[in-house]
Image (cartoon, rainbow, N blue to C red):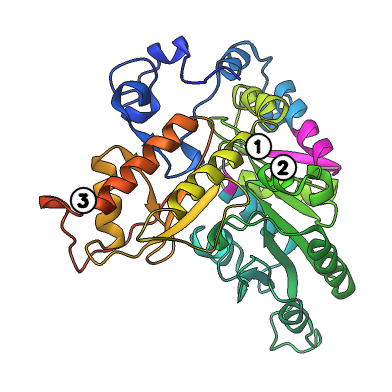
Amino acid sequence: MTSLLHNPTYDVMHDPAPILTANGPGSPESSGHVELRSDTFTLPTPAMLEAASRAPLGDDVYGEDPTVTRLEALAADLLGKEAGCLMPSGTMANLTALLAHCPRGGKAIVGHESDIYVYEAGGASLCGGIVYDALPNQRDGTIDLADIEEACTVDRSDPQIAPPAVISLETPQNRCGGLPLQLDYLAEVGQLARRHGVGLHLDGARLFNAAVALGVTPAEIGHYADTIQVCLSKGLSAPIGSVLVGDRKLIAHARRMRKMLGGGMRQSGMIAACGIIALTEMTDRLAEDHENATRLARGLSRLPGVRLDPGPPVTNMVFFRIRDDRYTTRSFIAAAARRGVRVEELGRGRIRAVTHAYVGREAIDRAIAIFADLLASGPRGAEFPARHESATMPPR
């Protein structure tokens, strides 16, 4: 694969973030920066920019943008569903799905470590009057089936009770180490949901990473869910957008909710064109990101003062803790940033590094070498740890 960094198009698309430009001052090659905070830092490929410039356009609020229609049909077909709806973000896609499934005063069963519960601003409660029932996630990202069964088993005739309407799962499970949910678990939750007459939503922001990791098709993962959200702008490198897929009735309801939330877009075929390239050209290369994550984890595991948590990566996320009294988590992150490696805290005291198309093997090795030097030499001057540092939230 030709490096995305060697792209002359970016010379005329100036970005003030140094790591995201290419072939100029401040590019990863010239500055030595390694961006591992999130795969949201990917840039659109040359093919995406070309497709966007040539896309047939119409007014999508009228349902007349042919490129959007093509993207929505493509996403639905890949995930084995009837229909799709382009959304500006994964947050809006998840929110519209919950609103489509759940009436006001109803209950959405979610994991307490899920992005929907932790990072999406309580939108379902604010906009839909939906009650979150946050159940404990296990270390592998699952929610115990007995806990889901108990949450679904209510007397629906009791006016005091918020009736369960939807179960939401996340795969890969970001805050549980980027682990994909196994197909047999998804099948069991799907059967449980049908037995209780509740919907099953799947937050699959990185679902294509899960498919690569499990060696299955996206449709096999999505088979048991009623609605699925997939993000185009993380490892798939599109500049913006997610797609929500499901049956026609649910997607029609979600489309109405999108309009209510201000997500109706006009000539959005320019966005959709990038999404089509993301789904047709960028999914297979995710295996390379997984290999680089494994390479990074292997290097980190050999460093004194580093502990992988929860363990070796399965997808493109590496989580680790610093066990060196000379550093706090925040001071280590700051010291690494000054040396050109950008990572972020996710979960108190735990660091996340995410590999993607703009981080190759050489960059991974450079990051490992910098981490090793920081741990060997200790803090220097301004790098000395402050004992009362506040954690910041990383991008999803």
Q: Say what amino acid the circle numbered 2 marks.
A: Val
Residue 85 in the magenta stretch? The answer is yes
- Please tell me which of labels 1 and 2 falls first in the chain: 2
Residue under numbered circle 3: 377
Residue occupying image coordinates x 64% and y 65%: 141
Please check the rendered image and state whether residue 48 is part of the magenta-colored stretch, yes or no: no
Secondary structure category for the residue under label 1: helix
- Checking the image for residue 212, the label placed there is 2
Q: Which percent across, then down, holds residue 7?
A: 48, 14
Percent across and percent down for residue 13 are 40, 17
Q: What stretch is highlighted in magenta?
A: 72-90
Whether residue 359 is visible: no
Indicate which label's residue lies in the foreground, 2 or 3. Answer: 3
Q: According to the image, label 1 marks what residue?
A: 287
Could you say where residue 342 lies in the image, as x and y percent from the top left? Answer: 35, 43
The quadrant where residue 230 appears:
top right
Q: In which quarter of the image is the N terminus?
A: top right
Left or right for 298, reference 76 = left
State the image quarter where residue 391 is shown.
bottom left
Look at the numbered discs 1 and 2 and tell me whether their residues touch, using CB distance below 8 Å: yes
Q: Percent x, y for residue 59? A: 66, 24
Q: Which residue is drawn at 65% across and 29% down?
A: 282
Please state the total of marks drawn on the protein image.
3
